[in-house]
Image (cartoon, rainbow, N blue to C red):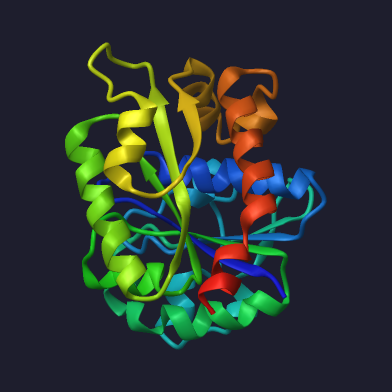
Amino acid sequence: MGHLISIASGKGGTGKTTTTANLSVALGGMGYKVLAIDADLTMANLSLVMGIDDAETTIHDVLAGEADIKDAIYSTSYENVDLVPAAVDWEHVLKADPRRLPSTIKPLKSEYDFVLIDCPAGLQMDAMNAMMSGEEVILVTNPEISCITDTMKVSIVLRKAGLAVLGFVLNRYGRSENDIPPDAAEEVMEVPLLVVIPEDPKVREATLEGVPVVEYAPDSEGARAFMKLAEEVSRIAGFKARVMG
């Protein structure tokens, strides 16, 4: 049985999509069968980072009751990695019912080692339905106090809802001299720090090229940090859920 992991945050723009894409490709490179799902129904970006921008059937069609989830799964150019893309036009957004996300995603657990769900930021209905489609959560935050406190609130809500929070990613560290240090961030978050992703121009370059940095510049600091995250996730995924169960 695979692991259903929601990638979540309290604020937009923290790097959830970049984390989902790179973690997917890194886990795929380790031999795991991975499915990445773009569940951010209004700000769909995952397919652009994963190099698929012409999908005929998307998660929106499935949530509108017009397609089966199997028809929205696409092979990517990355080893062992499939993708469920989202549509980018407002017409699709209006007809998709986010309440159908958990019942649509959960059955895919039996088909993959890891199902990674790129969720909207915050605690609105579409974000909650996306996050509750997982059984475990990885939180992504930047080293700013407002971002960390907002993500901590999401963590509290999800833990109360019964999800196992694996920990958090401190992304884009080193961008400012006012950055909250990793140990202080961990103290505020009250969940384990999984990895610090440094501010690395190669990550932005890779995103602009539509290629995850672990593939684009595998020796860069950013890529090495995402590989470390993949190793950590492969080690701990499922453990907390078993303990909580």
Q: Which residue of the protein is positioned furthest toward the left in this rendering?
A: 146
Q: Which residue of the protein is positioned furthest toward the top in this rendering?
A: 177
In the displayed structure, 167 sits above or below 223; it is: below
Q: Can residue 112 be seen in this snapshot?
A: yes
The residue closer to the viewer here, 58 or 56, is: 58
Quarter occupied by the C terminus: bottom right
- Residue 244 picture location, percent across and down: 51, 74
Residue depicted at 63% across the width and 55% down the height: 236
Toward which corner of the image does residue 121 lie, by quadrant?
Answer: bottom left
In the displayed structure, 181 sits above or below 114; it is: above
Residue depicted at 43% across the width and 64% down the height: 39
- Residue 73 picture location, percent across and down: 64, 68
Toward which corner of the image does residue 143 lie, by quadrant?
Answer: top left
Toward which corner of the image does residue 129 lie, by quadrant?
Answer: bottom left
217 left or right, relative to 9: right
Q: Can residue 10 be seen in this snapshot?
A: no
Residue depicted at 66% across the width and 35% down the height: 227
- Residue 61 picture location, percent across and down: 46, 77
Q: Which residue of the protein is positioned furthest toward the right in this rendering?
A: 31
How many numbered markers are drawn?
Answer: 0
Residue depicted at 35% across the width and 64% down the height: 41
- Residue 50 picture location, percent across and down: 59, 45
The residue closer to the viewer here, 174 or 39, is: 174
In the displayed structure, 24 sits above or below 213; it is: below
Quarter occupied by the N terminus: bottom right
